[in-house]
Image (cartoon, rainbow, N blue to C red):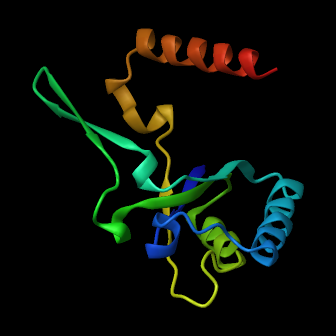
Amino acid sequence: MRFMAIVKANKESEAGVLPDPQLLEAMGKFNEELVKAGVMLAGEGLQPSSKGARVRFSGNKRTVIDGPFSETKELVAGFWLLQVKSKEEAIEWIKRSPNPFPGADSEIEIRQVFEAEDFGANLTPEVREQEERLRNQMAAKRQ
């Protein structure tokens, strides 16, 4: 099972305040634990929303909205993608994480990633084959 652990943004992360060296070191150690355990697939911090954009879809119309975005508590400051046996295991790992914003309240949301089998009959053999082909192409490009 794959889970995304989503680090919620706060005013400081949205202002572009960088983590101090101690937090970077603590996060590095935590990431090292995840990698050694074979559960970390990816993990990154994100630039503030002021450097981002959203694309709003309305029928065939596309509208680009430049950041920053106002609802800080709804924004993402970073993430981990974990491969674990259960939601409980993902929770146990994230509970071991350093506080992403020391000295402040922080929140990390954990969400399960859809797997092909979750779609049942809606995922036709043709679409399943296409997805496998694309995953293989992506893996080949990373090597």
The residue depicted at 13 percent of the width and 20 percent of the height is: 60
The residue depicted at 82 percent of the width and 64 percent of the height is: 28
Residue 12 lies, in percent from the top left, at 51, 74
Residue 123 lies, in percent from the top left, at 38, 23
The residue depicted at 34 percent of the width and 65 percent of the height is: 74
Of the 4 image quadrants, the one containing the C terminus is top right
Give the answer, above or below, for where 61 lies relative to 130: below
The residue depicted at 56 percent of the width and 64 percent of the height is: 87
Q: Quadrant of residue 121?
A: top left
Give the answer, above or below, for where 51 lies relative to 23: above
Q: How many numbered marks appear? A: 0
User: Could you tell whether 92 is left or right of 51 in the image?
Assistant: right
User: Could you tell whether 104 is left or right of 24 in the image?
Assistant: left
Q: Residue furthest bottom?
A: 103
Residue 3 lies, in percent from the top left, at 57, 54
Confirm whether residue 28 shows in the render: yes
Confirm whether residue 8 shows in the render: no
User: Could you tell whether 73 is left or right of 37 in the image?
Assistant: left
Q: Residue furthest left?
A: 59
Q: In which quarter of the image is residue 88?
A: bottom right
Q: In which quarter of the image is residue 96?
A: bottom right
User: Could you tell whether 53 is left or right of 17 in the image?
Assistant: left
